Amino acid sequence: MASSTYTTLQYLLDRANISDTVTSMSAFLDRRDFNGLAEKVFAKDEVTIDYTQLWEKEVYRQAEIWRTMTHFLTSCQHIITGIMFDDLPQPEGDVPTPQKVKASANVLVTLRRDGIMGDSTVQSGSVYNVELIRVPGISGNPWRISYLQAQSTWSKGNMEVMKNPN
């Protein structure tokens, strides 16, 4: 049960936990630990992954899409930095414990795919806009990503690296 007043200690713990969730997303993805993504990063059956700004395709409803988007890559690296909390309230006065938070982060992505024509890498810079929800009943970090939107700011290299050969 959420406390009626949001404390400074809870605020600091929430900041750390939210940062851990967002940065863990890249670590699990780069290590192809899809179970870790499902168990420790994404809200179960509630996650929306929005790449429409990048590829003008549909919005995905499950994190499992990343398995199909990366299985043909030799390696990938997502570096997340500059996490900003858009609406995590300061614990002043009678502020209730937040159950949902928006954040954004800068992301540098390097993808490598051996055995294709041309350069085997592509790099891009993006901003990830995320919404996280506090999931009750979880011991440890209760924050899970329920929405992720990627907004590309630049790219260079061989775009063929990202195309699924199947």
Image (cartoon, rainbow, N blue to C red):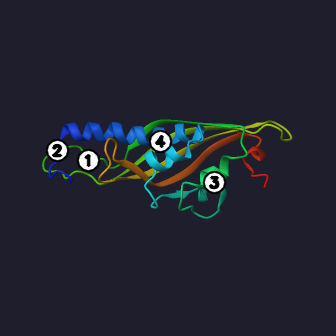
Measured as percent of width and height from the top left, residue 153 is found at 60, 45
Residue holding disc 2? 92
In the picture provided, is 72 more to the left or to the right than 135? right
Label ID, residue 89: 1
Label ID, residue 54: 3
Residue at position x 47%, y 42% in the image? 105
Most extreme residue toward the right is 117
Q: Amino acid at mark 1?
A: Pro
As drawn, 31 above or below 97: above
Element at badge 2?
A: loop
Query: Tag 2: Cα neighbours inside 10 Å, few (<14), some, or many (≥20)?
Result: few
Element at badge 4?
A: strand
Measured as percent of width and height from the top left, residue 31 is found at 59, 37
As drawn, 22 above or below 45: above
Which badge, 4 or 3, is on the more N-terminal residue? Answer: 3
Element at badge 3?
A: helix
Label ID, residue 105: 4
Query: Label 1 vs label 3: CA separation?
Result: 31 Å
Q: Amino acid at mark 2?
A: Glu
Q: Amino acid at mark 3?
A: Leu
Label ID, residue 5: none
Q: Quadrant of the N terminus?
A: bottom left
Q: Quadrant of the C terminus?
A: bottom right
As drawn, 51 above or below 161: below
Say if mark 4 contacts mark 3, CB within 8 Å: no
